[in-house]
Amino acid sequence: MRQVTATGQTVVEAVKSALAQLETTEDRTEVSIIDEGKKGIFGFGSRPAIVKVTVKIDPVEEAQQFLLDVSEKMGVAANIEVKREGKQVQFLLSGEKMALLIGKRGQTLNSLQYLTQLVINRFADQYFTVILDAEDYRKRRNETLIHLAERLAEKAQRTGQKVTLEPMPSYERKVIHTALMGNKRIKTYSDGVEPNRHIVITPNK
């Protein structure tokens, strides 16, 4: 945490001095007045104003830096575009060797997303939802999941047997539930305990 204690003839001057030392602006800091100071008479009994100025931590910047550090340690020079909509923050990764950050079936990307969400919410006043994507992987994965859902729903109808899918994170399960919502011939539900929670498709008899 970056903070300085500064003095000045007035509180305003003391704050200006602190901001200059921290190389930042007042809107990005918290100011605590330790002593408002005293003018005195003809220079006698005067006392300088003392303030403590602390730089506020930006949770989004912290999360972005975390991703850059992890990517670098994995040997990937990632470019990160940040999109913020209300309480949802998207980090869009691009560059070479993105496959390393995505991992098999997106497992590395999912783990990174989970860790980034922990980092951002450690520093935030409100709860943020993080979506981490690399080279449009999420969109491609969603399309794959929708095709898989349709194919397995058809299998459940054809065989009259329930079909159990592999464990998936909650947002991927939601894609499948949503894709099959309009199909009245089958039902979907989640079963199991995280991280092994999975979807079951059963025919409507």
Image (spheres, rainbow, N blue to C red):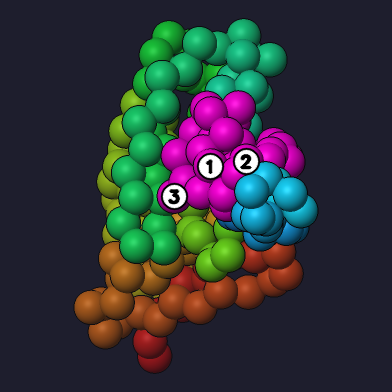
| Local SS, label 2 | strand
Where residue 29 appears, as percent x and y from the top left, is: 55, 48
Name, please, the residue furthest toward the front. Answer: 42
Picture quadrant where residue 90 is located:
top left
Q: Which residues are magenta?
A: 1-28
Q: Are marks 1 and 2 in contact (CB under 8 Å)?
A: yes
Quarter of the C terminus within the rendering: bottom left
Q: Residue at x 63, y 74 (%)?
A: 191
- The three-letter code of the residue at mark 1 reads Glu
Badge number at residue 8: 2
Q: Are marks 1 and 3 in contact (CB under 8 Å)?
A: no
Quarter containing the N terminus? top right
Viewer can see residue 81: yes
Q: Is residue 64 left or right of residue 92?
A: right
Tell me which residue sits at (32%, 44%) in the image: 83
* Disc 2 residue type (three-letter): Gly
Image position, residue 77 (x, y; %): 50, 11
User: On the image, numbered disc 1 is attached to which residue?
Assistant: 13
State which quadrant residue 87 falls in.
bottom left
